[in-house]
Amino acid sequence: MRHCRFVVLVVILFLVVATGFAQQTDAAPSSAAAQSANFDVKAAVEAYLASVPANARARSDAYFEGGYWLILWDFLCTAAIVLSLLATRLSAKMRDLSERVTRFKPLQTFIYWIEFLIITQVVSFPLAVYEAFFRERKYGLMNQTFGAWFGDQMKGLLISLILGGLLVAVLFGLVRRLPRTWWIWGAVVSIAFQAFTAVIGPVYLAPLFNKYTKLEDERVKQPILAMARANGIPATDVWEVDASRQSSRVSANVSGFAGTLRISLNDNLLKRCTLPEIETTMGHEMGHYVLNHIYKGLVMNGVVIVVGFAFLSWGINFALSRWGESWGVRDSVDIAVLPLAVIVLSIYFFVTTPINNTITRTMEFEADMYGLNAARQPDGEANVDLLLGEYRKMDPGPIEEFVFFDHPSGRTRITAAMRWKAEHPETASPEELARPMFTTP
Ligand SMILES: [Zn+2]
């Protein structure tokens, strides 16, 4: 066990070093202020950070740091469940049941999937309830009653049942037909599946959980559409989503591909933010669209998935040659191998957490830069960053941010905004320009 932990540690260290080059240089160069008007970037950032009351800061830190541990608990919980499915031969019995029901292989796979999903979801339910309901409520982020939350979970389970069942049936079809090269084609199918859900998600899946209405308020709609036109985004409507149904978090997105393109902002953003804050948020979302982050994300995640499937193929062969017989799993074509596949992929994604976070965090930072240039509201941006700090630690250490943050931290984002402002004194208010911080030396 100690040896195993050591290997994981070495792998994590390697990943940290290897991908360190890709990390953003988020901190402001110390000479930034001196290069332009005499605006003290550091002082402005500290002033914003200091505006968060100490108890609010402590609460958000505790919430976010608890999330680090949840990554570990989720992983251990999944590992324990799927290993016991194998060790007790329950997985083999589930396969036997599916084979008694039908001789048609894809249907056998689908029946096994239903058994697997229901058992794993029921067993992991206590952790899921704590994590996604009671913990959210404890930190004041949950707006739903237990019943409404549970209803959403059931809808999610139904979607996993259908879409996950389709994916697993196709993947095992590949394993049966291409026993040597299935992992390459499996990775390709998984990437295509990701693209497929990205296309249908905003139009067919998201409305199952929330109501989308066209935004009528011209004072908000017109500036957003003007910014969209100026940035070459073919949108004629802005959508409002009732995210307050679930939580009080502020967010927005531009989702879908050409045919399903949608600019939507959540009602929390509309209720809690000023127009400059809404504009900078929409500028960020437009950045995701214009910079083709959906496609780039598919390519970068694609690399992670291909390597993951190679690891999966190796891991399955390794484990089956040792314990396959005692688990009652015949070979890698046997659907009863699924729990093993889940544990191998869980290990892989657990270890690659910093890589996956860095892929998204890097794109989020690019979108921030885009949003600052498109909306030209650095103070609006800093204010929104403070709101996001309600559920994301504002001021982490650099390694902490690299490993655990899928978005830049509040400090990184506010620093970027103030650095931008220092180079654009024309966006400062007349009062600010009159203050000493903007006078040229
Ligand atoms: Zn974003």
Image: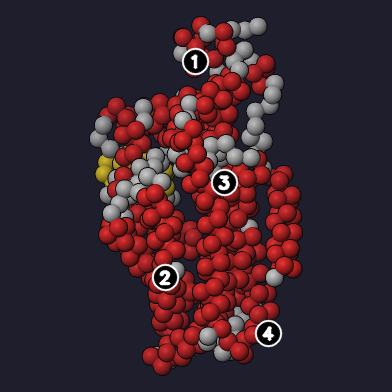
User: Which label's residue is closer to the chain start, 1 or 4?
Assistant: 4
User: Which label's residue is closer to the chain start, 4 or 3?
Assistant: 4
- Circles 3 and 2, Cβ within 8 Å, touching? The answer is no
- Circles 1 and 4, Cβ within 8 Å, touching? The answer is no
Q: Residue at x 70, y 21 (%)?
A: 31
* Residue identified by numbered label 3: 405
Q: Which mark is residue 428?
A: 1
The quarter of the displayed image where residue 252 is located: top left
Q: Residue 98, position in %: x, y?
A: 42, 87
Real-space Cα separation, disc 2 to disc 1, in angstroms:
53 Å
Question: Image height check: is 55 above or below 243?
Answer: above
Real-space Cα separation, disc 1 to disc 4, in angstroms:
67 Å
Q: What's under tag 1, amino acid-wise?
A: Ala
Mark 3 closeness class: few <14, some 14–19, many ≥20 residues within 10 Å = many
Q: Is residue 262 in sight in this rendering?
A: no
Look at the numbered disc 3 and give the secondary structure of its residue: loop
* Residue identified by numbered label 2: 121
Q: Residue 248, position in %: x, y?
A: 35, 42
Which quadrant: the C terminus? top right
Farthest-out residue, front: 55
Real-space Cα separation, disc 4 to disc 3, in angstroms:
37 Å
Q: What's under tag 4, amino acid-wise?
A: Arg
Real-space Cα separation, disc 3 to disc 2, in angstroms:
27 Å
Q: Which mark is residue 322?
A: 4
The quarter of the displayed image where residue 369 is located: top right
Q: Residue at x 59, y 20 (%)?
A: 43
